[in-house]
Image (cartoon, rainbow, N blue to C red):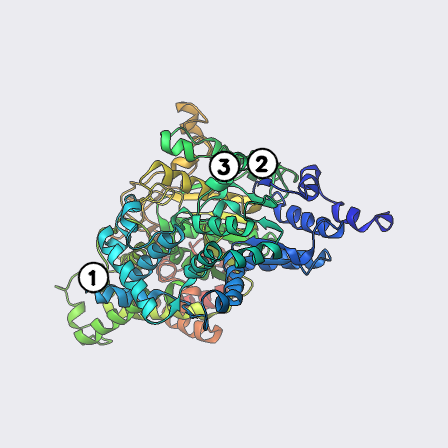
Amino acid sequence: MKDHLSLEERVLSGLDEEQRQVATALHGPVCVLAGAGTGKTRAITHRIAYGVHSGVYQPSRLLAVTFTARAAAEMRTRLRDLGVGAVQARTFHAAALRQLQFFWPQAVGGALPNLLEHKAQLVAEAARRLRLGTDRATVRDLAGELEWAKVSMLTPDSYLAHASERGTPAGFDLTTVARVFGAYEELKADRNLLDFEDVLLVTVGILQEDARIAATVRDQYRHFVVDEYQDVSPLQQRLLDLWLGGREELCVVGDASQTIYSFTGATPQHLLRFASTHPQAQVIRLVRNYRSTPQVVGLANAVLTQRRPAGKVADALWATPLELRSQQASGEAPQFLECPDDEAEAAAVARLVGERIAAGTPAAQIAVLFRTNGQSEAFEQALAGAGIGYQLRGGERFFTRKEVRDAILSLRAAVRAAGTGHDGDAEGAGPDSPPLAQQVKDILASIGYTEEAPAGGGAVRERWESLAALVNLAEELVLSRGPGLDLEGFVAELQERSQSQHVPTVNGVTLASLHAAKGLEWDAVFLVGLSEGLMPISFADTPEAVDEERRLLYVGATRARAFLHLSWSLSRTPGGRAHRKASRFLEGIRPGSAAQAGPAAKRRNRTERPALTACRVCGTLLSTAAERKIGRCANCPASYEETTFEALRAWRLETAREAQLPAYMIFTDATLVAIAERKPTSLKALADVAGIGPTKLEAYGEAVLELLAAS
């Protein structure tokens, strides 16, 4: 039947009613409010194709603009498939750079200055000119602040007047940041360089000052489409206005509830005010969600609707959210899990991920999403320990981060300086030496570790999180291996774990920050670390910042197609004080929260914690994952024979070498201790040891039993 349809009719076939409204609204201004998973890219690409095929648009005179190279590439692919590959789809910067390269000779003369791909080195030099001590993380935060200032169209002179609410970027007062800004701009001018933001700024300047060039650009492009319009900065909006030159042949697409980049200068205000700025605008809402099940959509909607008034300023900036309506079949209810500590949460998530994979969900269709990159290490370790491949998106693997590499170098240097040998009689391992964790803290203090987390976010905070993760690991290893673990042993353990990062994990589970997950989707999504201080993040200290954190959680939830799991922990480290609580954003959503049930039901329906286990020696309740795995508390002496434990370790090392895996991926030390103490004599008894699942039982069970029988 479709063969008898015209080309234009075929372009429109398969669109729902609202998408068809978008595709046939060929003259601007048009504002498309498109919720997550509602097919906005499909709607706008079919609009472009329908306009071209019906003769309304000339392909060379339409410019589609989006925010990432990946999104622009996807749009070009779809346009090509629809037979309109001549239409340009570019990022703001790519479009501006093309115009700048063309018009620079006539507008300015001479060759276009060189483009500065990375500003960190120049920012560091500007800081050094002012005799400021800066490390890599501080430079990154300073660079981010300068980018915010420039997309907000501020200069070093006007920065102070408009940055009063920016706090202390990179730990500096605003006056100091303004001085760094000025020195950076001077260095660029001296070396004839343009940075990323200058491409937009200079293009804006040329279009404002040269009427002939502006007329040429406006004659070239008659129609504009802007995707992700909630993310435009003041500078990008100014460029768009100059391209338009007062015309209204513009279609914008966005969702204010997905505004999660305000810290970069993005603002949804242009989207929210579009109808008042353009009184003749046609506003179309896309709310049919084709991505997720009703259960996932219902939770995502609730994350936004549970928001309560937060003051005049915040309420004015909060947009009434679109209420999504799922078009998928009913699925699983979202699951919630409260854990005693971060280690237990990571272990539980790894186990559940393994169950999903065993049930048929491809690993590549599973994601673990967290608020900060510093949270990744626990999940990297847990997945690796479970033999599950993973890939880290939007950040470096934990052991390849510069601060982690620097930390390991510092720890190695301390081992050499102490003259530590393999016999454990070194200065750093004596009876009067500080505990291992304290030694690690003291050594890492030289590269930036502090007992208290730094205020604010950004690279400085992420650097601290990475160093703190190493301190936590030292504390956990002492508990599982005993106080005899010295600094050299800890460094050897770090080296062994770092090697696992080189194992190919092409078809692995995705680990990503919530920001890096924007625009992506998976069958199953695990949202982790949903406790106060992480979600919302501790430095979200204004109602507006908290609202952005809420939107970030909404974005994370809408990444899931069929299954959504939400978890949090009560303590950062095993055995730590349970001072955390679940994120306020889960109130009224998770089972047993105040808005869902009364006091009696709240206690009855409360999310279950891991079962309480008593020490098999003294009967004390075990409080950490490591203690529960071994089956006794840290205060009770080990009951295994040293020769048995050493035989198990030797077997593990040989097995790991043959499999080209790090030793802890065969069995962790805690599991070896538990095996040595229990000395199981059958596969069934061995399976009762924590950390030995069906896969490891099949792979190593017979060998372990044979070794135990011989020892």
On the question of residue 696 being in view, the answer is: yes
Instruction: Tell me which numbered mark, 3 or 1, is placed earlier along the sequence.
Output: 3
At label 2, which amino acid type do we have? Leu
Answer left or right for 665 relative to 187. right
Q: Identify which residue, 61 or 524, lies in the foreground.
A: 61
Q: Quadrant of residue 472?
A: bottom left
- Between marks 3 and 1 in the image, the one whose residue lies nearer the viewer: 3
Label at residue 285: none
Residue 155, x across and y down, in percent: 32, 54
At label 3, which amino acid type do we have? Arg
Q: Residues within 10 Å of mark 1 (few under 14, many from 20)?
A: some
Q: Is residue 16 above or below residue 507?
A: above
Q: Are marks 1 and 2 in contact (CB under 8 Å)?
A: no
Disc 1 to disc 2, how far (Cα)?
Answer: 49 Å
Say what secondary structure mark 3 lies in. Answer: loop
Q: Which residue is mark 1?
A: 445
Residue 200, x across and y down, in percent: 45, 58
The C terminus, quarter of image:
bottom left
Q: Identify which residue, 363 or 462, lies in the foreground.
A: 462
Instruction: Tell me which numbered mark, 3 or 2, is placed earlier along the sequence.
Output: 3
